[in-house]
Amino acid sequence: MTSPDAPALSIVVPAYNEQEVLPEFHRRLASALADLGLAWEVVYVNDGSRDTTLEVMLGLQAADPRVAVVNLSRNFGKEIALTAGLDHARGTDAVVVIDADLQDPPEVIPELVAGWQEGFDVVYARRNTREGETWLKKATAHAFYRFMQRIGGKVQLPPDTGDFRLLSRRALDALLKLREQHRFMKGLFAWIGFPAKAVRYDRAPRAAGTTKWNYWKLWNFSLEGITSFTVAPLKVATYFGLLTAIGAVIYLAQLVVRTVFFGNPVAGYPSLLAVVLFLGGVQMMMLGIIGEYLGRIFNETKQRPLYFTERYLPSRQAS
Ligand code: UDP
Ligand code: MG
């Protein structure tokens, strides 16, 4: 990937229907990086947008030689779009991953770069506040991070951290070796390891356009995170089954004793039904959990490429 004119730093920006913010994003990015003293490029990934995002990108690319454009063949979702951008990043020294909607302020990038110059391979931006988001979104995000921390084991997700971060070239090369279909990027970023450092910032509300997330998507995203991160849920069935069996044995012993000493009054039908329904429900749920993993195994075994690019226009010069 390295060519003589390759820039030191690549900024990777996945975008889906971001026509309103992209010009403003590019302006703010360029002014934030003006005094950086490093040659940089920005890789805009159009993730099958339904609006004029691609045209806006092509306009930026024509006007600014530091702009590269990757156009995916359809919408693949943010995680894959990000991967496509990272694949096409020519930066020889480092990459920065940032959202297009200006929720991650480009002004923080020099601080990330400073962290990298101190010698850290991964410098992630940790948010102080989440302006313009509902308390429910904040609360659910908080709960999710705490939960992931508890089940994470050796691989710990840094809390209150999105995808906004800097990776050194060697960290990026490590990340790019992970080609799984189900890409929970926060988990992958954490999994590769390397010396890491946090930089704090205030997360702004979206500058324009609307979020592509809703609670159903967030739920599925959490499932993705959990199932690609840990097999702990598969063990729940084992322990639950064990507990149930122990309970059943105790109940049985109690029943025998009672029948021998006090005779056998007719046992309750409702309690029987309750137990049967409860265990049936638990079994279905456990089958569902196994299914979640099985479906992912199915997808991985197909070994499909992660995405297809419709076109790639590299940046034309180091700034
Ligand atoms: N995005 C993308 N593909 C998608 C959905 C989103 O590339 O299918 C991009 C989007 O344009 C933005 C980033 O991913 O740059 C984050 O998306 P969004 O702001 O909707 O998520 P949130 O900030 O609410 O987590
Ligand atoms: Mg956003």
Image (cartoon, grey):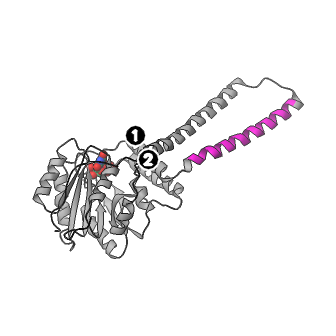
Local packing at callout 2 (Cα closer than 10 Å; few below 14, some 14-19, many 20+) is: some
In the rendering, at what x and y percent does residue 279 appear? 63, 34
| Residue named by callout 2 | 300
Local packing at callout 1 (Cα closer than 10 Å; few below 14, some 14-19, many 20+) is: few
In the rendering, at what x and y percent does residue 8 appear? 24, 70
In depth, the one of 41 and 277 nearer the eye is 41
In the rendering, at what x and y percent does residue 143 appear? 47, 51
Q: Relative to residue 78, is residue 50 depicted above or below?
A: above
Counting every numbered tag in the picture gives 2
Q: Relative to residue 165, is residue 48 depicted above or below?
A: above
Say if residue 194 shows up in the picture: yes
Q: Amino acid at mark 2?
A: Glu
Q: Which mark is residue 286?
A: none
Left or right, 239 with respect to 17, comes to: right
Left or right, 261 with respect to 291, comes to: right
Q: Relative to residue 253, is residue 98 depicted above or below?
A: below
Say if residue 158 shows up in the picture: no
Q: Amino acid at mark 1?
A: Trp
Q: Which residues are magenta?
A: 234-259
In the rendering, at what x and y percent does residue 319 appear? 16, 68
Please tell me which residue is depicted at 33% across the width and 68% down the height of the picture. 169
